[in-house]
Structure formats: C-alpha cells, structure tokens
C-alpha cells in the first residue's frame, strides 16, 4: 500500500497546529499589505489582518511561489510515495492551475485536486482524503473521488458591509451607495468556482434565516436529507455573532450535534473581499 501525504493551503482554514496534529502539510497563503509580504497564520494572524484592514491598508492576495510548492513536495516525497494536494478553488485563484502545471514533472506522484472548494468545505475535503488514504486508496483514486463529489456542498455568506466588495471592484460604487443607504445585507453563494449573489436581506436576522432555509433546502433536494449532511460554519472577526448563529441553526436543523456544526474563521483570501462582520453556513454531503 502506498504511503500518501495530504497537503492543503491555509485557505482551508486549517492552522499549522491542526495540520501537525493530523499529519497534513499546510501551505501558508501569501498576502501583500502596503507592499510588504506576509504569510497567513505564520507572520500574519487573524487579529493583525483585521487591524490593518480597519486602518485602510492596501491588501492584496497572491499565489504561493512555485518554489514554495516544489520545496514542500520534494521534502514530502522523501518520506511518502505520493502526494494529494488540495488547494483553494480554481475559480477563485490561479494557484490551482499553477500547481497542476508544476505537478506534471512528478510522473503522477503529485495529484493536484481541483474540486473547487474553499474554507470549511476545503477542510472537509482534507478529512475525506485522509479517510481514503487510510483505507488504501492511491493518490490518483483520492483525487478522482474528490473531484467527482466537488459539487456536493454549498456555501452561503452574509456580508455585513458592501465597502470591501466595492473596493475590490466586485460592486459598482452606485450599487454600494444604494445598498448602504438601504442597509441591505447581501447573501452570497459559492458552489464550485463562482462567488455569486444569492438574495438580499433587510436585516441580519433576515439574512440568517435566508441562509438556514437555503442549506435545509439543499440538503433535502440535492444531498439526501439532513441526516446525510454536515453543516459547517465560518465568520469574519465576529465570534459572538457566530455563536448565536450556530445556536439558531442547530435549533432549526435538529438531529445534529455540535460536531456537525464545526465553525472556524473564514479564509483571509475571502475575508479581504468581504470584510469583518460576515457569517457563513455550508452544507456538505457525507461520504464516509
């Protein structure tokens, strides 16, 4: 049986400490803040990121350097037969296609998974890959399974402010101004490669109910019912709001314990475009 290494990037929300505990290699995503290079969870913490965001710093995301990928792969292949690398969605970053191109020089020993996941859904793919590896699957078989099931999840995100969508060019200034005046709370949706508008809400309460109803409907219509799903959550620098939202979601979706409502801070690659105060809930089909 081949010895398989599983690797992902910090867009999964997995910290170096969690990766070490699971035996998963975590590649930190780079950011430029006022022209200075930082690495997520290494030289840039969540609190530091939001402090700089509030100060109006110029923040831009970047792909991992090819040398960082190659160095990690070459090191892992000294101890493992094959690698499964699960980067963030190819629809949200070019890092996946870069990795796939680099992997062609490794004669199939490095499998890059393009299953278009991000944040807690990307993290779920890591756990699925570990399960498959422990049960004897090859790197290619793991990659094929994760790709085959890539659409078995949905993400809904409530944006607290339109400021950062406007700044990132994802919203016109006029639309942002109107939305701010009307105090609209947009609910966005991620399924596969796109971040799209889903619904508009007039309040945080209404936005939360829209998201809870949406994941319940997805579970019933597409994933075989609530009992076959997990409902993970994410947030941006607003933990008390997340705790309240999780309690509301658990009350609305009975039959699940808190492990099915795992929550973590949203990836900084998404956070820099939507800002603080956001809440997200995901529904993913259980495969194991």
Image (tube, rainbow, N blue to C red):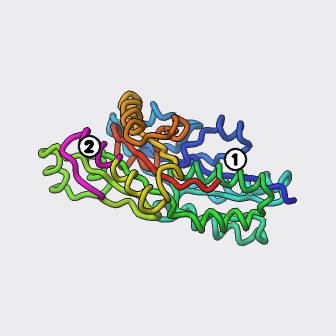
Q: Return the residue at label 1.
A: 25
- Residue 208 highlighted magenta (yes or no): yes
- Residue 273 highlighted magenta (yes or no): no
Secondary structure category for the residue under label 1: strand
Residues at circles 1 and 2 in contact by the CB criterion of under 8 Å: no
The residue depicted at 43 percent of the width and 57 percent of the height is 220
Q: Nearer the viewer, residue 232 or 22?
A: 232
10 Å crowding of disc 2: few (<14), some (14-19), many (20+): many
Apparent side of residue 213 relative to residue 101 in the rendered image (left or right): left
Q: Position of residue 228 (x, y in %)?
A: 54, 52
* Residue 51 seen: no
Q: Position of residue 143 (x, y in %)?
A: 67, 65
Q: Position of residue 42 (x, y in %)?
A: 59, 37
The residue depicted at 30 percent of the width and 59 percent of the height is 197
On the image, which quarter does residue 250 sit in? top left
The residue depicted at 37 percent of the width and 30 percent of the height is 244
Q: Return the residue at label 2.
A: 161
Q: Position of residue 163 (x, y in %)?
A: 26, 46
Question: Could you tell which of marks 1 and 2 lies nearer the N-terminus?
Answer: 1
Apparent side of residue 275 relative to residue 75 in the rendered image (left or right): left
The residue depicted at 87 percent of the width and 59 percent of the height is 1
On the image, which quarter does residue 161 sit in? top left
Q: Nearer the viewer, residue 60 or 117?
A: 117
* Residue 188 seen: yes
Q: Which residues are magenta?
A: 198-212
State the mark number for residue 111: none
Query: How far, Cα to Cα, is label 1 from label 2?
Result: 34 Å
């Amino acid at each position: 049986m081949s010895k398989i290494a599983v690797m992902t990037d910090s867009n999964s929300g997995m910290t170096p400490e969690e990766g070490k505990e699971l035996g998963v290699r975590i590649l930190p995503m780079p950011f430029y803040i006022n022209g200075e290079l930082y690495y997520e969870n290494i030289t840039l913490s969540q609190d530091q990121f939001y402090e700089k965001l509030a100060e109006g710093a110029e923040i831009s995301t970047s792909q991992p350097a090819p040398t960082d990928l190659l160095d990690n792969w070459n090191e892992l292949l000294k101890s493992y037969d094959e690698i499964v690398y699960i980067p963030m969605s190819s629809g949200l970053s070019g890092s996946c296609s870069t990795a796939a191109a680099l992997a062609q020089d490794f004669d199939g020993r490095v499998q890059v998974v393009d299953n278009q996941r991000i944040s807690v859904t990307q993290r779920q793919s890591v756990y699925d890959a570990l399960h498959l590896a422990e049960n004897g699957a090859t790197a290619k078989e793991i990659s094929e399974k994760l790709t085959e099931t890539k659409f078995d999840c949905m993400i809904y995100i409530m944006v607290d402010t339109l400021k950062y969508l406007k700044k990132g060019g994802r919203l016109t200034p006029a639309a942002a101004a109107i939305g701010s005046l009307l105090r609209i709370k947009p609910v966005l949706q991620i399924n596969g490669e796109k971040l799209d508008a889903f619904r508009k809400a007039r309040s945080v309460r209404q936005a939360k109910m829209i998201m809870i109803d949406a994941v319940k409907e997805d579970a019933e219509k597409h994933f075989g019912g609530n009992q076959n799903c997990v409902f993970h959550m994410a947030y941006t620098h607003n933990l008390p709001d997340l705790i309240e939202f999780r309690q509301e979601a658990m009350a609305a979706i009975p039959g699940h314990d808190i492990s099915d409502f795992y929550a973590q801070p949203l990836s900084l690659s998404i956070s820099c475009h939507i800002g603080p105060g956001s809440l997200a809930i995901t529904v993913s089909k259980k495969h194991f």
